[in-house]
Every structure is written in structure tokens, then in C-alpha cells.
Amino acid sequence: MQATVRASPNIALIKYWGKRDEKYNLPAVSSISITLDEIWTETKINFSPNHKRDILTINNVQQDDTRRVSDCIDSICGEHRNFACVSSKCNFPISAGLASSSSAFSALVIAINQAVNKGYELQDLANEAGKASGSAARSMLGGFVELENKKNKIQINQLLQSEDWPLRVVIAITDSQKKAVSSSEGMKLSSKTSPFYNSWVKNQSEDIDEARKAILSQDFLRLSEISEHNCMKMHSVMWTSRPSIVYWNSATIECMHAIRELQKKGEFVFFTIDAGPQIKAVCLPECESKVVNILKEIRGVSSVLQSGLGQEPQIK
Ligand code: 2P0
């Protein structure tokens, strides 16, 4: 009745922003991501008839609110179950736009399935992970992952394995505080108020097709162009929400300019930014040290994380 699973967050190149169904947390758009490897969440779950309630600790701090985790366990096990003790550890800042919920919930659903021997298939578990956190479904696979919207559910597909195209990711941390607007609140606001929201949803399939082709042909410049464009479109939807949602700070913009300068010099690097102020630079391995050296000198960058592309979650 116990299991431990380690999973890595993923970074979307073609973004998810908006929900078509809030109850089942189904995304309004398909998305494409890369799963990381050096950064991870490790989650241990232990069910026991002796527990009086679900207990959740994150990085050794007991949490008052276990609702999202308890709902996820109920959804897989049913409500007539033993209570669980869940302990989760992360080796990177949480709730700061580094997709910690993607590694946390992908690890959790696999740990639950393993601990209670439910025998769920991968796609069912991906739907359970996605119900808890939309981006978590993509961390159920390694490498390059497409999350496809299907009728009443989602499906995840691996486009390439991490070894097929071993890109590197350099993350410039510009602020590791918890973000002011959660992704769920932000998406709700954008769908109700941004004049660009409908066209964002309508045009997403073109970006998905373009990025998929770029990935399958390992065409870095093509992937770079469509990823930056899709990122800027998502942030335009955020910025034009009412009230406006701006996750960037001045260092985010400085980093963006620095990456554009590197591109002008012929370096193979592009940026992407999620619901937080961190910049994620995706590059070819031979450009990594230049990218790190430039980003770490920018005022406001407190640290730089480096990662390759990783595998699906591992049962310990
Ligand atoms: C993404 N983000 O595709 C986009 C880009 C943030 C910006 O997926 O509401 O925390 O729990 O389903 O999983 C944020 O994702 O959102 C997110 P919920 P979640 O990575």
C-alpha cells in the first residue's frame, strides 16, 4: 500500500491556456511540451487504515489544504478508501512558473496506481493527472510530447524520445516567489475578458501542426520561430485580460532581448515563458555555455538552472 515515484516537470513549447470544461479540467487547446530531467519532484504515498485523514507534506512542510491531492486520490480509488500520507519533495522552486504541478501530479497518479494496484493504463492515468493539473498529463511521457484534445478526454503522444533530439534547457530564475495569479484563475479571467481569447483557441491547431513538423524533422529554427510566436500570443491573451495578467518582470524582458541578440549572432537558442517571470531558453548543446554565461549576468537573474530532456516518471 505504498509507492514512491519521481517525475520531472515539462515546459510547453505550444502552450495550454484556457479550459473547455472546468469540472473535468479539460484544456481548450492542444499543446506540445518537452519533459525535463535534472529537475524533479519525488512523491511517496502510503495508505493505511490507521490514518485519520489525508496528510500532505511538501518539502517537509505539512500543508493545511489537501483538497487537490485528496480529490485526485478519490478520483482513482473511489471515496471508500483508506486515508493516505503523501510526502513530496522538489529540487526546484514551486509555484513560481516552473510547472511544479506537472511533476507533482504526474508522480502522484502513478504512485497511487502503484500503491493500490489499480492497473490503470497510461492514457487513463494521463487523464487523471490532467484533471488535477492540465499540464501534468504531459509529464507522463518523456522527450517531446503532444497533448491532443479528444471528445471528453485528452490523449498524450510521444513525438520524439529525449535521446532522438537532446536539446538543452537553461532556466533563468528572476523571482522565486509564489505567483500572484494562479494559472486556473488566470485562464478563467482570460476566457471571459480577453478580446483575443477566441482567436487564440481557433488558431492553435496551426501552431501545433507547425511545431509537430519541426520536431519530427528536428528543424531547430522552425521550432524556434513557432514556439516564440505561440508564447507571445499566449502572453498577449494574458496581458489583454481585464484586469491584465502580467507575469513578467524587467529581468524577464532583459533575458528575452539577450536571447534575441544571441540569435542574431547565429546561436541556436529560443525563449519561452510560462505563468511566471522565469525565462526558459531552449538551445542546442553546443550553445548552452554561451546562453548560461549571458543570462546569469543579467541584473535580476538570481540563479540559472540547466537541464536536458528526460524520461517518463520512474517508480522507485
Ligand atoms: C502550459 N501553463 O502549457 C501553460 C503555459 C502555464 C502557461 O499549463 O489550471 O498549473 O492546474 O490545469 O497545469 C499551467 O498549468 O494549470 C500551464 P491547471 P497548470 O504549460
Image: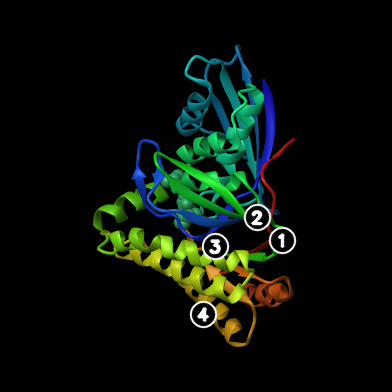
Measured Cα–Cα span from mark 2 to mark 3: 13 Å
**248, 312: nearer the viewer:** 312
Q: Please, what is the three-letter code of the amino acid marked with disc 4?
A: His
Q: CA distance from mark 1 to mark 3?
A: 14 Å
**Gap in angstroms between the C-alphas marked 1 and 2:** 8 Å
Q: Which mark is residue 143?
A: 2
Q: Upstream in the sequence, badge 1 or badge 4?
A: 1
Dot 4 or dot 2: first in sequence order is 2
Per the image, the residue denoted by label 4 is: 257
Q: Is residue 59 above or below residue 144?
A: above
Cβ atoms at labels 1 and 2 below 8 Å apart:
yes
Amino acid of disc 3: Arg
On the picture, is 3 further left or further right than 49? right
In the image, residue 286 lies at what x, y percent? 74, 75
Pick the residue in front: 58 or 10.
10
Q: Nearer the viewer, residue 231 or 157?
A: 157
Label 4 crowd bin: few (<14), some (14–19), many (20+), radius 10 Å: few
Q: Which residue is mark 1?
A: 164
- Give how far apart the Cα atoms at labels 4 and 3 are: 26 Å
Which corner quadrant of the image does residue 220 belong to?
bottom right
Label whose residue precedes the other's in the sequence (4 or 3): 3
Can see residue 299? Answer: no
Eye-nearest disc, 4 or 3: 3
- Residue that extends furthest to the top in the rendered view of this protein: 49
